[in-house]
Amino acid sequence: MAQGKPRLDAVTYLSSALEAYRALDPAGQEQLLAEAAALGQKGLAINDPQQMHQLRLYQGGATISALQVACVNDVGVQLLLPGQDVGIDFAREHELAKGMVGGGSQAP
């Protein structure tokens, strides 16, 4: 978050990630999280929109920004490993994203 305000780009990416996870079966969700987490282990420059990565199981194999990968990872962790720390605090953005996709206070 910048200066206490939510990152609107992250809200959009989290919303898309929520929809992507909801479209997958449990095994697909685990595979998508594993793929995003593996990229995250290498380090993600989330403030560099030029750094691009491909996620095979996300939006048909989309090439996405590092921030989008971080958002896919965040949603997957909240869904499959609740309580784990992903290292980036998207709590405020995540709540806004859940509202956008009709998630309310439910889990992703």
Image (cartoon, grey):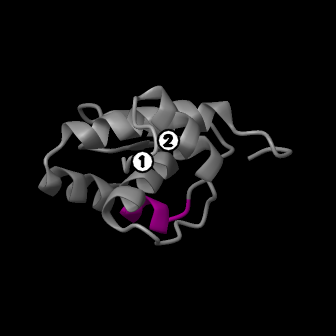
For image coordinates 69% across by 37% down, the residue present is: 7
Range of magenta residues = 37-43
Q: Is residue 55 placed above or below 43 in the rendered structure?
A: above
Would residue 81 appear left or right of 74 to someone viewing this image? Answer: left
Rendered view: 100 above or below 36:
above
Front-lying residue, 67 or 77: 77
Identify the amino acid type marked 2.
Gln
Residue 62 percent across, percent down from the top left: 33, 33
In which quarter of the view is residue 48 placed? Answer: top right
Graded by Cα atoms within 10 Å as few (under 14), some (14 to 19) or many (20 or more), the crowding at tag 2 reads many
**Which residue in the protein does label 2 denote?**
68
**x and y, in percent, of residue 44 in the image:** 56, 56
At numbered mark 1, what does the secondary structure look like: helix, strand or loop?
helix
Q: Residue at x 80, y 44 (%)?
A: 2
Q: Residue at x 41, y 59 (%)?
A: 78
Q: Nearer the viewer, residue 33 or 43?
A: 33
Q: Residue at x 13, y 56 (%)?
A: 27
What is the secondary structure assignment of the residue under circle 2?
A: helix
How many marks the image carries: the answer is 2
